[in-house]
Image (cartoon, rainbow, N blue to C red):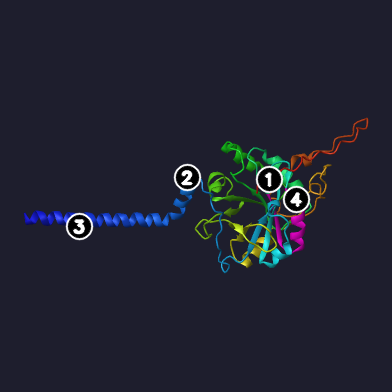
């Protein structure tokens, strides 16, 4: 009898120890997963997600930048530059007909303040890639930049579209810009990268919005967007804050790898001459990589018709609608 009691007691002790160990493991797992669980709970309950806002060790990532659009209001770029900001990416266009209403003003002021400047285009899943490329290039021509031209690829504020159409249209737009000798960078978050970019556009430079700090094996991002709620002097609203993934010396060498090019686009009469029809001039870009020139630009001139044709009416540019950054 005593032996049986002893065996049962040992079983109880072992079971209790195993239960405590299992509870400890579950507790540790929940602790490490608390951020993800919080996001799931917020999604289930409909609680708004707080904007991404990570602190960055400036000793490791010394080069700070921002990206802006008309959503950020009237910006004092001299104050921005005085707040340790070194580069800015400015929204230029969206889809095939929209130009950001503050593009020209933001560009002129940023250049005057001595910032390194670039442009980005919000990519529409439901519009042709070549048409988007033409629109983007038309808007930024004549405005030299220091950074690659950026294509902003986001699922938010885009219609649900067949995967192969999205990839195909994005490939068409990148190809169009590269045939002009321009250097192209893709902006996206981690989920969009895994869905559309990884394995399809591994040769494109990358600007990644992420809560993970660069440094993991295989991390190839050049720019890292780490906050959607930054505060910078001279900007009246919260602003996206970015950093270059490297030292200041590496940033300098990266900029030097983007030599000046002078892409020539065909002149067209348009209504918005201030925002669209700036004369063709230099953009900083990669040298042409042996890609053929735009076929339309190679066509021989059509002989004049026997009778003079009436002058063509100027192209109408659609009214600029509100956009989403």
Confirm or deny contact between disc 1 and disc 3 (CB under 8 A): no
> Residue 314, can we see it?
yes
Across and down, in percent, residue 306 comes to 93, 30
5, 196: nearer the viewer: 5
* Distance Cα–Cα, label 4 vs label 1: 18 Å
Across and down, in percent, residue 280 comes to 80, 50
* Distance Cα–Cα, label 4 vs label 2: 43 Å
The image quarter containing residue 2 is bottom left
> Can residue 258 be found in the magenta stretch?
no
Tell me the residue that label 3 is attached to. Answer: 13
Tell me the residue that label 4 is attached to. Answer: 140
**Mark nearer the N terminus (1 vs 3):** 3
Badge number at residue 64: none
Kind of element beneath mark 3: helix
> Residue 198, can we see it?
no
**Mark nearer the N terminus (4 vs 2):** 2
- Which is closer to the viewer, label 4 or label 3? 3
Looking at the rendering, the stretch of residues picked out in magenta corresponds to 100-120
- Which is closer to the viewer, label 4 or label 1? 1
Q: Is residue 201 left or right of residue 37?
A: right
Q: Is residue 34 left or right of residue 306?
A: left
* Distance Cα–Cα, label 2 vs label 1: 28 Å
147, 188: nearer the viewer: 188
**Mark nearer the N terminus (2 vs 1):** 2
119, 198: nearer the viewer: 119
Badge number at residue 44: 2
Quick one: which residue is furthest to the top in this view? 307
Badge number at residue 323: 1
Callout 4: 10 Å neighbours few (<14), some, many (20+)? many
Kind of element beneath mark 2: helix
């Amino acid at each position: 009898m005593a032996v049986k009691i002893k065996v049962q007691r040992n079983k109880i002790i072992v079971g209790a120890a195993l239960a405590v160990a299992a509870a400890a493991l579950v507790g540790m797992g929940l602790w490490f997963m608390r951020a993800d669980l919080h996001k799931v709970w917020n999604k289930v309950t409909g609680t708004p997600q707080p904007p991404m806002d990570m602190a960055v060790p400036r000793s490791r990532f010394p080069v700070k930048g921002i990206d802006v659009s008309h959503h950020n209001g009237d910006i004092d770029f001299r104050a921005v530059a005085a707040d340790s900001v070194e580069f800015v990416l400015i929204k230029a266009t969206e889809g095939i007909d929209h130009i950001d209403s503050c593009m020209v003003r933001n560009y002129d002021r940023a250049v005057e303040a001595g910032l390194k400047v670039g442009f980005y285009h919000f990519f529409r899943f439901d519009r042709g890639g070549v048409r988007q490329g033409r629109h983007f290039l038309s808007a930024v021509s004549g405005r030299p930049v220091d950074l690659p031209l950026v294509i902003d690829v986001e699922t938010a504020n885009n219609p649900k579209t067949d995967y192969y159409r999205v990839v195909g249209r994005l490939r068409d737009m990148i190809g169009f810009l590269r045939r002009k000798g321009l250097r192209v960078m893709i902006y996206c978050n981690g989920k969009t990268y895994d869905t559309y970019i990884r394995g399809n556009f591994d040769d494109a430079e990358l600007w990644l919005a992420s809560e993970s700090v660069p440094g993991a094996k295989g991390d190839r991002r050049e720019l890292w967007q780490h906050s959607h709620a930054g505060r910078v002097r001279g900007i009246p609203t919260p602003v996206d804050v970015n950093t270059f993934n490297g030292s200041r010396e590496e940033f300098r060498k990266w900029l030097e790898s983007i030599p000046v090019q002078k892409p020539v686009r065909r002149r067209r009469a348009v209504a918005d001459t201030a925002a669209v029809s700036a004369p063709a001039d230099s953009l900083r870009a990669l040298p042409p990589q042996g890609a053929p020139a735009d076929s339309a630009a190679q066509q021989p001139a059509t002989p004049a018709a026997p009778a003079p044709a009436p002058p063509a009416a100027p192209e109408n540019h659609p009214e600029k609608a509100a956009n989403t950054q």
